[in-house]
Image: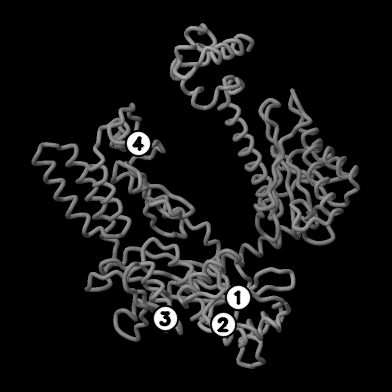
Amino acid sequence: MDLQHKLSNLPTAPGVYVMRNEAGEVIYVGKAVNLRNRVRSYFQKSAAHPLKVRVMVEHIHDLEIIVTDSEVEALILENHLIKEYSPRYNVRLKDDKTYPYIKVTVQEDFPRVLMVRRRLNDGARYFGPYTDVTAVKKTLSFLRTLFPLRTCSKKIVEGQQDRPCLNYHIGRCLAPCAGLVSKEKYGEMIAEVIMFLEGRIDRLIPELTEKMHQAAAKLEFERAARFRNQIRGLQTLAERQKMVAQHNEDQDYLGCARYGELACVQVFFVRSGKLVGRDHFLLECSAEEDEGEILRSFLQQYYQDASYIPREVLIPEELDESAVLEDWLGGLRGGRVYLRTPKRGVKRQLLDLVIKNAQVVLDETKSRQAFKEKAQEKALQELQEVADLPEPPERIEAFDISNLQGTNIVASLVVWEDGDFKSSDYRRFRIRGVEGAPNDYESMREAVRRRFQRGLQEREEQVKDGKFAAFPDLVLIDGGKGQLSAALEVRDELGLIMPFIALAERREELYLEGSSEPVVLPLDSPGLLLLRRIRDEAHRFALTYHRNLRGKAARTSILDEIPGVGPKRKKDLIKHFGSVKRIREASLEELQQVPGISAKLAGEIYQHMQKS
C-alpha cells in the first residue's frame, strides 16, 4: 500500500504515527488526538512549517499508525516507541539508558541498598535516575557510614545462623545472616534510609534523636553513640539544604537552555520547602526545535522512569498539551499533578535561577565538546600523516591477545568509529589453533584471519546488517614488530588492502609496515593518546573475557564429568565429605550414605574417581 493511499484512509481517532525513510528506519514518532488531521498537516505545503518538518517530510517513505483509546494512552505509547527506536527527528534524552538509580530491595526480608543501571518491575524502591555516577557512589558511601546496611548478595531469611563477616565486627553491618537483628528492627533502619533518599532529613533527625535518648536511658551506650553519629552526619547535610519556600510541599523546577542540536534541562528538587538536590539532563534535538517541544519530550521521557513525582512541576512556559500531561503524570503518581508556569514572585525567581543553571551547564558542555573535537581532529590528522593514509581514519579496529601460560587463549576486537567506541561491533575470539606454550604470533594470525574471513564472506553473500561486513580504515595491533608481521601475513593472504600498525606497550613505540625501526611519538601527542586509549580498551575487553573463562574453569569440577551427578548431588557430596579429595578416598559404602546416591550411582562415582 503506497503512502498516498494510507494518507487518504487515516482514521479520526487518537493514536500514534510512526514515519519511516526509504531504508525502513524510523525517523519520527508522534501522537495525535486526531490522526487524520495531524498526519495530513505534515504533507500540506505551508511556509509556516518549521525547517525540521520540511526536511523530515522529504525523507518520509512509509507510514504506520496505531490507534489508541485516549490521548493519554497515545502519549504513553509515543514515549515507549521513542525510547525503542531513538528516531532522528524526535527530541531524545542522551544516553538515558545509562543513567544510574539507587535501588532499595524492599522486597527482601533484609533489604540492600545498591546502584543499578536498569529499573525493573521487581518490587524494589528506586531513586533517580541520576546523571552523576560519582555523586551516586558518594551518596551510597555516606549512607553506609550512617547506617550499618548489609552489602552482601546472600539470600537471608529471619533466624538464619551463618557466621558473621568482617563488616559486623567493625560495626558496618548488623549481621542479619547470623540472626543478630530481627526483621522488624532492620526494617526500621531501611525506613530511615528511604526517608533520607527522599530528602526528608528534617523528619528523620527528630526520630533518630528520640531513639538515641531511648537507647541512653536503657544504658545501651554503643547504640546511642551510633544514633548520635547519624544525627551529626545528617545535620551537616541539612545545613547545605537551602530553604526556598515557606510551605511544606514537594515541587520540581525545570529550566531549559538550547544551542544547535543540543539542549539542557536543569531540575531543582524541592522537598518540604527545601532545595534538597539538583540534576541536569542533555537532550538531542533539531536546531529549530521550540522550547515547548523540548520540555514536553523531557517530561515524558524523564518522569516515565522517575522514582518520585511531586504534586507540582514548575516549567518556564505553558504547554499546549498540559492537561494530557497532567493526567498522565497523575496516573504515574497516583494523585493529582499540576504543571505550573509562574509569572512573578518567589517561584518565578527560583525558576529563572534554574534556567540560568541550565545555560551554565550547556555552555560548559559546549566548551568541553569543542575541546574534545579539536583534540580528536588533531589526533586523526597526526595518524593520517604517521600511517601515510589518504585521509583521516573514521573507523579503527584493534586486536589484543590475552592468556595465562598458554591456557584459555583469547583475542579481542574493539572498534572506534566517528569519535567514540562502538561496543555493538566488539568481538571476542577463543583461540583454538594454539595449544601448550604461549604463541602470541599464531594467536594473532588466527584472530585476524577469522575476523576478515567472516567479513569477506558476508560481503560476498551480501548479508544484510552483517556483523563483520564493515571494514576499518586502520587496524591497530597490540604488540611489536612480530605481532604486526603476523597480522600482515594474514592480510596479504586474504588479498586485503588496508593499513596495519602496531603499538608496543613497554615504550609506546609505533611499528609501521615496511619499516624496521619504530616511530616514537611524544607521550602527549594527540595521535598517540588516541591509539593508547583504543589499545587499552582492547586490552580491557580481552582481559575481561579471559578472566570469565578462567573463573568458569575454576568453578568446574571432576564431579561435573560423571553422568547422573547434577548440581544438587554435587552439592550434597561436597557437603557430606567436605572436599573432592575426600570423595576420591571414600569407599562404595560411604558414598551410598549420601542422601540421593543409589548403589548404582555410587559405583559410577567410585569408578570415575579412581580412574581420574
* Residue 543 drawn above or below residue 590: below
Specify the amino acid type for callout 4: Ile
- Residue that badge 4 annotates: 156
How many other residues sit within 10 Å of disc 2, few (<14), some (14-19) or many (≥20)? many
Instruction: Name which residue type carries label 1.
Output: Ile
578 and 447: which is toward the camera: 578
Q: Is residue 584 above or below residue 309?
A: above
Q: Split into 4 quadrants, where in the image is the C terminus?
A: top right
Quadrant position of the N terminus in the picture: bottom right
Tell me: 91 left or right of 269: right
Report the side of 334 relative to 188 (left or right).
Answer: right
Residue occupying image coordinates x 45% and y 82%: 321
Judge whether residue 82 can be spotted in this image. yes
Disc 3 to disc 2: CB gap under 8 Å: no
Disc 2: which residue: 35
As helix, strand or loop, the secondary structure at mark 3 comes to: helix
Q: Position of residue 599 (x, y in %)?
A: 52, 12
